[in-house]
Amino acid sequence: MFLQGKTTVSQYLLRRLLIVIPSLIGISLVLFVLLALAPGDPFGELAQNPAVPPEVRAALREKFGLDDPIMVRYFRWLLAMLQGDWGFSFVSRMDVDTLIMQRLPVTLIVIGASQVLALVVALPVGVYAAMRPYSLFDQVATTTAFIGFSLPTFFTGLLFILVFSIHLDWLPFVYQTNVSGTGLEYIWEHIRQAIMPVVVLGLFQGGVLTRFVRSAVLDVVRLDYVTTARAKGLREGVVILKHIVRNALIPVVTLIALQMPIVFGGAVVTEQIFRIPGIGSLLIASILANDTPVIMAVTFVTACLVILFNLIADLLYGWLDPRISYR
Amino acid sequence: MNERDMRGLIADVKLGKLSRRAFVRRMVAVGLTAPLAAQMLMHSGVAMAQSASTYKPTKAGGGGALKVLWWQGPTLLNPHFAVGTKDQDGSRVFYEPLAGWDSDGNLKPVLAAEVPSFENGGVSKDGLSVTWKLKKGVSWHDGKPFTADDCVFNWQYASDPATAAVTIATYKDVEVVKVDDHTIKVLFSKPTPFWADAFVGTRGMMIPKHIFENYKGATSRDAPANLAPVGTGPYLFTEFKPGDLVAGKLNPNYHEANRPYFDTFEMKGGGDAVSAARAVLQTGEYDFAWNMQVEDAILKRLEDGGKGKAVITAGGNIEFIGVNSTDPWTEVDGERSSLKTTHPSLGDPAVRGALNLLVDRQSVQDHIYGRTGVATANFLNNPERFRSTKTKFEFNIDKAIKMLDDAGWKPGADGIREKNGVKLKYVYQTSVNAPRQKTQAIVKQACQKAGIDIEIKAVTASVFFSSDVANPDTYTKFYTDIQMYTTTMSQPDPALFMNQYVSWEVSTKDNKWQGRNITRWRSEEYDKLYRQAEGELDPVKRAAMFVRMNELVIEGVAVIPVVYRPTVAAVSSKLNAPLSGWDNNTWSLQDWYRDA
């Protein structure tokens, strides 16, 4: 770099954030053009209704600026976005940011909880399996993990509903935001309805992670410095936690970050199955209704989240492995 | 059935020889709507029946929560912007019209004190006006009284083109005058046989003047109340999340005694139809689910649980095959299926007749739709004396073969029939949808046996039903020989439904394929009848005209009706929910209650 010394974290962060801007603009341009070229019309349903004269549709199209050329519409959208105006939903006739803010918390809670669950399961299982490779525990863990990530979430979701809601009648399969009750009962109802979607997403993610943690640990466990650590007479627990896991975690962190788009994809499907009012189900509904401003906003939010997680992963590297410097 | 037959039937009703309900059912069978049938009775001096209320609870409230599932949840709650039925159903929880349509097509007063008629002087003899008396003592959810000013405002609001209300067609050609605080007069510019459109049913829900006054015209979309309704309905608004949730609580000042029964109301959106059916029929988590587009076999299996049942309501939806009258394979002036062409083989009535014989509707019903799609031979398939000998339906391959032979269509070397070098090869398109693809297969098989080659084409629904002018695969362009979809007759009056075959509605490049006549079938007699019906004030004469128009379309094989598609709802076995095929699902929400 121009300064021969070490670049600090904040400089690195600034540089990364500057790179984010053109990529977000690129993403938004591609999304916008694709949506504009795709067939469908937000007011198409009106065309099928004989009681609605075509003039109404024309008036609505004009009102929402749908008749302008694509590039004009794109720049209008971009300018508005820069000023913090997310647009106006054609279908719900309300501001898109309100619509998204209504939905985003649920998605983040469900995805967050499932990621935590995945980590809680994958880390100990993966590490333990790698410490005793080809033992019975390892065999069972690997096989289960394999099944876990081979089954798509829509399948496990339906299976769970069939078993736990319909046959056993333990858990509700319609997710409600307005749960009745107060205090503990309220919290319990929320947990009860979140169990299935969180487990479905968490186990899928956990399956992938378990196998990855196992192989990462296996890579490290045979290295000389581990033997050295043991030879020093360190306790096994310290060897595992401080020397093995910390080093093995570096690729795992990358994986978690890179898996985020897949998790969001899985959440879209899971939300649809369990009727979770998150941004995933909002996305599906707005795609079906050709509600362009909402589709744009949701995909854009997702893109931002994915970029954000990548950035977090890069920052975590440095903390996990000081040898990695930010340049 | 002609005018005389109908008069005979009405006389039977008057004498009590035929029940009202049976009469209505027969009229529906000949392609009329129940509301029109009820209007015929009324015009002939048989008063509209006030359907006996089955409502049992003796006090309002105490019913706990009513939980319903709309697998596509309402996305907005202003009835004047309600695009689909889901939005109308959601709006109807809070907003009400002057009157609604019951399942037999009777008008039931809601915000009106009584239904206008000749007897009470509400309906003028010249067909130029109708006077509504409003119910007194009705208040909006915020306590302000409901008056004639509100009605006048709704007319002004909806008829203003700048508002861009979807209800504009109902209001733009009428004038609404306040007579006194609780009386309004709707004036028509020309004699109007079907007067019960403005302020009635799905398009008649009313919004309060004092809340929306400043949001008429261009600012309509900014009204906060678009998302937080203040109406007169049985439930007060509490929460709305577009596509996810509509919630309300009991309106203690509701204008009908002892209603509503439930303390809270919750309409949950999202998900899919099958799991919605499960939540009602199998687990009982919910009381009601809307629009069960689910295979009948699955519904039956779910019903076995005994927690609920599928309730089937007759409406006016018909799945049919449209037969192209023009040539889709020749381009004239930049458009295919141009009016300047004639279809080389489908122009022959014998070929059309043969096609009609090759659609096995019974199998389609038995193997695909079950209770959710009843084989409709034609519009005249009811037994007894109404069966028209001219438009009889049957499935008969041999007869079709003979018909084609007689008309000179002989099998060629490849087994496909031809005449003068024209082969009977057709492209049959519809939208991607499992039951539709199965129906295509059934038709294709029968046609093959008769020497007609069918190429099946399935277009994604979002393309097929779009109005995209640049796309050649839309149903309004109809660039194939035959195509299949469902046409809905949600309007209580058949006039709008029947304009699908008038010559001035033909879908062409000039009108950007927005015309309603998609088969491009034209008939002078049909046009003439339609024009007459527009100004005919005698509902019986008018009905006879519609029946004749139906016959013309069927005889000319402009279309081949396949199945009649009633709407299906999943209802908990304890819930009493009166439904109507001529109004919204929630049209009588105030009357819903649960058996103890």
Image: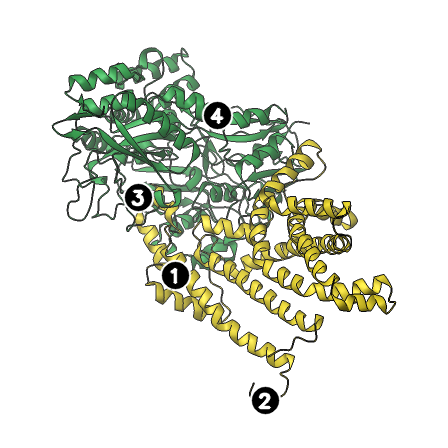
Chain colours: A yellow, B green
In this rendering, is residue A131 above or below B495? below
Q: Quadrant of the N terminus of chain B?
A: top left
Q: Picture coordinates of residue B554 (x, y %)?
A: 26, 24
Residue on which disc 1 sits? A33
Q: Are marks 1 and 4 in contact (CB under 8 Å)?
A: no
- Amino acid type of the residue tagged 4 in the rendering: Gln
Q: Are marks 2 and 1 in contact (CB under 8 Å)?
A: no
The numbered mark, 2 or 1, whose residue comes first in the sequence reads 2
Q: Quadrant of the C terminus of chain B?
A: top right
CA separation in Å, label 4 and label 2:
90 Å
Between marks 2 and 1 in the image, the one whose residue lies nearer the viewer: 2
B174 relative to B57 in the view: left or right? left
Residue on which disc 2 sits? A3
Work out whether residue B236 or residue B384 is closer to the camera in this orientation and state it: B384
Secondary-structure class at tag 2: loop
Q: Residues within 10 Å of mark 1 (few under 14, many from 20)?
A: some
Which image quarter: residue A64? bottom left
Tell me the residue at 45%/65% (across/down).
A28
**Chain letter for mark 3:** B
- Amino acid type of the residue tagged 3 in the rendering: Asp
Q: Are marks 2 and 1 on the same chain?
A: yes
CA separation in Å, label 1 and label 3:
21 Å
Q: Picture coordinates of residue B294 (x, y %)?
A: 50, 32
Between marks 1 and 4 in the image, the one whose residue lies nearer the viewer: 1
In this rendering, is residue B338 above or below B567? below
Residue on which disc 4 sits? B50
Q: Residues within 10 Å of mark 3 (few under 14, many from 20)?
A: many
- Amino acid type of the residue tagged 1 in the rendering: Val
